[in-house]
Image (tube, coloured by chain):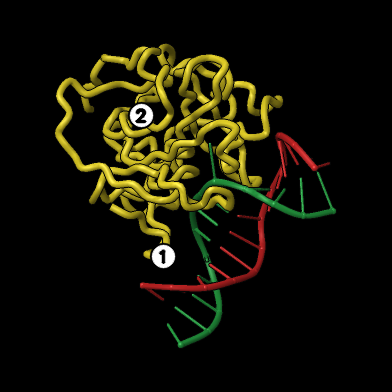
Chain colours: A yellow, B red, C green
Amino acid sequence: MLRIPASILPRSFYERPTVEVARDLLGKLLVHGRAAGRIVEVEAYLGAEDLAAHAARGVTNRTRVLFGPPGHAYVFFIYGMYECLNIVAEPEGTAGCVLIRALEPLAGIEIMQRRRPKARSIEDLASGPGKLTLAMGISRRHNGADLTRGALTVRAFPSAPPFEIAAGPRIGIRHCADWPLRFYIAGNPCVSKHGSSRAGIA
DNA sequence: CAATAGATCATCT
DNA sequence: GATGATCTATTGC
């Protein structure tokens, strides 16, 4: 079993502009219980000016946590079937979050395989927002959870190997579809694939 | 390999 | 009552 680094990211890490937080989350470790994976793909969702973001419609029962303190989880249910994990950024009172789109599984791989029997390879276990929440056992009960303490955390590797960040348009949205707010680790096989037509720009 | 249909429900109009 | 930050299987070249 992989030894999990203990340095949990502090709240100050998240209390910054959403795009900065998004880019800096790449290469970090998402841990839930014994399962853990490296974040290889994210998308930034902003506030009122970003029509693609849930926060654009203002505070509702659902979007409440987006306007709350940073470093908390925002988990929503979509398409009647899947859940997506976001991390709240920006200071309290300002909306902004980072959608975690894909992980490179590093620990608890057998657990993930049990949760996602349809995955045919390791890199397919968490290579998408819905797959990731299934593999990691994340659901709506984690909505609002504090990621700086508890079973669900984000941590930094003691020494992170360098990697190249690529950017491109976000996936699966109608509004602001050309904003380059999707970031991923170039060349990583665990980054989600949607056909060559939706590939990002370098 | 590319395109598309179906599953299925919380949220908001 | 429509829609959506998805995934999978299936169909068609």
Depth check, front residue: A151 or A169: A169
Looking at the rendered image, the quarter that the N terminus of chain A falls into is top left
**Residue A198 point in image, percent of width and height:** 42, 60
Which of disc 1 and disc 2 is earlier in sequence?
Answer: 2
Judged from the image, the secondary structure of the residue bearing numbered disc 2 is helix
Which residue is denoted by mark 1 in the rendering?
A197
Front residue of A123 and A72: A72
Give the x, y percent position of residue A159. 15, 24
Specify whether residue A165 is in view: yes
Marked residue chain, label 1: A
Residue A6 is situated, as x and y percent measured from the top left of the image, at: 26, 14
| Residue A54 falls in image quadrant | top right
From where the camera sits, is residue A122 visible?
no
Dot 2 corresponds to which residue? A20
Q: Residue at x 42, y 25 (%)?
A: A17
Please state which of the two labelled residues, at mark 2 or mark 1, is closer to the viewer: 2
Residue at image coords 55%, 50%: A173
Q: For the residues marked 2 and 1, what is the alpha-carbon distance in whole angstroms?
A: 27 Å
**Which mark is drawn over residue A154?**
none
Q: Residues within 10 Å of mark 2 (few under 14, many from 20)?
A: some
Location of residue C2 with respect to A93 vertically, above or below: below
Residue at the extreme front of the image, as rendered: A49
Please tell me whether mark 1 sits on a helix, a strand or a loop.
Answer: helix
Between A169 and A112, which is closer to the camera in this rendering? A169
Q: Amino acid at mark 2?
A: Glu
Tell me the subunit letter for badge 2: A
Residue at coordinates 35% horizontally, 29% vertically from top-left? A20
